[in-house]
Image (spheres, grey):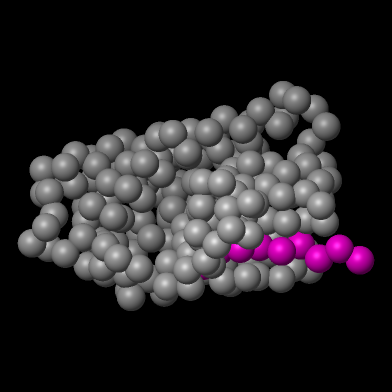
């Protein structure tokens, strides 16, 4: 019987997305610590799986997939059934839109601009102007999410699904970092619903205070 293997460190934002979905799907798996203080990303065996030398990477039998959102789509299509991978292309596109928006818009501004630029950068080294710009950008993104969630309880529609994972992974850190945030009641309600999910608590709501003011792993 094949065992799903997942390489990455649990405090990696992109690994958390994958682990969250694995938890939602109830998949038996083996987690292999890699990256950061665990190292291993330049090992020839790892580079043979992912030539870019980044986590997460999964191995599912003979199938190897890298890039977090590609992994999400693969797992949803393989194991998710209609709840996570509907047969109708239009329905699937509801998730795809938010997955790609999270990758190209929300995550660069929050994870790179705010979480790295503010939280992980020592105060003396911060670019306060750049950070302020990214905080403002994140506020716009949260208002956009708030408008979308005024019409439905989950990003993809009436049920929790793949659309919620990439954007939803941001929320634990976004609401845990001391930056100015707009009033976004629909996002806050969504966040409370996510916190009710055991897989979210287990894989996303992990302490990150050890990363404060720390650029190196």
Asked which quadrant contains residue 108, the reply is top left
Q: 42 or 201: which is nearer to us? A: 42
Q: Nearer the viewer, residue 18 or 135?
A: 18
Instruction: Measuring from the top left, give residue 194's x and y in whole percent.
Output: 56, 59
Residue range in magenta is: 1-9
Is residue 53 among the parts visible in the rendering? yes
| 59 displayed left or right of 16 | right
Q: Residue 135, percent across and down?
A: 24, 45
Tell me what residue is drawn at x 8 percent, y 62 percent: 124
Q: Residue at x 65, y 52 (%)?
A: 49
Q: Is residue 7 magenta?
A: yes
Q: Nearer the viewer, residue 91 or 34?
A: 34
> How far across and down, in percent of the image, does residue 167 sit?
49, 46
Question: Compared with residue 158, is residue 23 higher up or lower down, i.e. above or below?
Answer: below
- In reply to whether residue 143 is colored magenta, the answer given is no
Q: Is residue 20 above or below residue 130?
A: below
Is 195 situated left or right of 88 in this image?
A: left
Q: Looking at the image, can residue 17 be seen?
A: no
């Amino acid at each position: 019987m094949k065992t799903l293997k997942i390489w990455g460190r649990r405090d990696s934002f992109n690994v958390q997305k994958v682990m969250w979905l694995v938890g939602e799907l109830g998949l038996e798996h083996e987690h292999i610590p890699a990256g950061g203080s665990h190292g291993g990303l330049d090992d020839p065996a790892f580079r043979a799986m992912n030539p870019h030398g980044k986590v997460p990477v999964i191995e599912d039998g003979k199938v190897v997939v890298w890039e977090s959102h590609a992994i999400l789509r693969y797992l949803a299509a393989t194991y998710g059934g209609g709840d996570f991978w509907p047969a109708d292309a239009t329905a699937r596109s509801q998730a795809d839109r938010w997955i790609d928006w999270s990758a190209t818009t929300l995550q660069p501004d929050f994870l790179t601009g705010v979480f790295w630029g503010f939280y992980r950068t020592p105060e003396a080294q911060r670019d306060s102007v750049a950070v302020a710009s990214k905080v403002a950008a994140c506020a716009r993104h949260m208002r956009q999410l708030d408008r979308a969630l005024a019409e439905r309880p989950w990003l993809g529609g009436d049920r929790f699904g793949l659309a919620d994972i990439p954007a939803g992974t941001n929320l634990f850190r976004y609401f845990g970092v001391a930056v100015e945030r707009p009033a976004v009641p629909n996002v806050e309600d969504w966040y409370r619903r996510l916190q009710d999910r055991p897989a979210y608590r287990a894989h996303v709501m992990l302490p990150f205070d050890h990363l404060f003011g720390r650029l190196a792993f």
